[in-house]
Image (cartoon, rainbow, N blue to C red):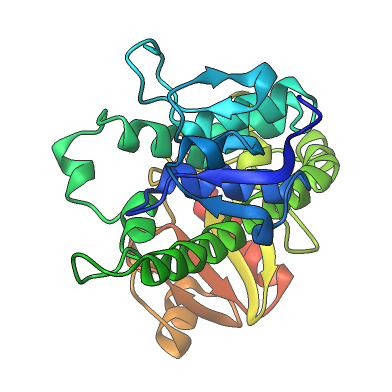
Amino acid sequence: MSSDKQIGAVVHDGPFHADEIIACAQLIYAGLIEKKEIHRSRDPDVIEKYQYVIDVGAVYDESRFLFDHHQSSYSGLLSSAGMVAQFLHNTGIYDRALFHHLKDELIDHVDDFDNGRVSREILNTPTFSHVVENFVPIREGGSKEEMNSAFFKALDFALGHFERLVERYKYRQRCKDLVEKVMETSGEVLVFDEMVPWLENFFELGGEKHPAKYVVMPVPNGWKLRVIPKNYEERMGARRDLPKEWGGLSDQEFELKCGIKGGKFCHKGLFIAIFSTKEGAIEAAKKSLL
């Protein structure tokens, strides 16, 4: 980096998209810039001033912190969002697991959407990219001040989403040891004594080969009995449904039908049921296995 560069980033002015918004959000999250250090311009003299150049400038050179993908000399699949994510991974700010999690959950979608690699169904379905672009002022030909204000509102929204995405991932990672211990000591029913993010961890830890059919776990209003899907990709499926006759019942009617005191509710989709006690949920799991 040249010593005459100013701290901060420059991104093109005018209408904006999710890729430069998320590129900037990542740099803020990484502590490399602050929001007040982001400047919006296409002026080459302004572009030349700052450390990080995002989605403008017609150069992709990670070593010089230049992250544009619009020039004909670049034929890769990334947008500025993916370019910055790759940079943060290469510099060790993202470890391998976090990098791939962010790609799967957000970055790849933003890259594909910005580069026109999405299906008609995706184009017609509200996505993160659609939501960000909806911050662009409705009236055509708005002032520079109006457009800049909208950009930073979108950035605040995206940064909040990104921070929660990372923190949720880190929390799930902290819970992985607990999930592994329960898996090691369980057969067809996984019983947790606290609420934890189990689904992703279960399959990351080899859950496809585990014999478990159900999960029992506390919820704010009791204890839930939940089916386990066949695999992570088919999360709406079930290895074994709850009993068909329980579907859609609640309160006394459900309690009488399942024969378990404290039965509260069973979803008509037969994937979850709620009981007032842990013992009741475990008993229901055992009945469902018969």
Q: Nearer the viewer, residue 210 or 242?
A: 210
Q: Residue 66, how many percent across, how many down?
A: 58, 26
Q: Is residue 7 above or below residue 276?
A: above
Give the quarter of the image for residue 176.
top right
Q: Nearer the viewer, residue 41 or 166?
A: 41
Can residue 290 be spotted in the picture? no
Give the quarter of the image for residue 226.
bottom right
Q: Nearer the viewer, residue 49 or 94?
A: 49
Please report the residue visible at 78 percent of the width from the left and 48 percent of the height from the top.
31
Quick one: which residue is furthest to the bottom in this view? 252
Please report the residue visible at 74 percent of the width from the left and 32 percent of the height from the top.
94
Q: Nearer the viewer, residue 143 or 87?
A: 143
Q: Residue 8, how many percent across, how many down?
A: 69, 46
Q: Is residue 263 above or below residue 77?
A: below
- In the rendered image, which quarter contains the N terminus? top right
43 sits to left or right of 282: left
Q: Residue 73, how many percent across, how many down?
A: 38, 10
Can residue 253 be spotted in the picture? yes
Query: Number of numbered discs present?
Result: 0
Please report the residue visible at 17 percent of the width from the left and 42 percent of the height from the top.
121
Give the quarter of the image for residue 133.
bottom left
Q: Residue 138, how many percent across, how many down?
A: 23, 70
Please report the residue visible at 72 percent of the width from the left and 56 percent of the height from the top.
34
118 sits to left or right of 20: left
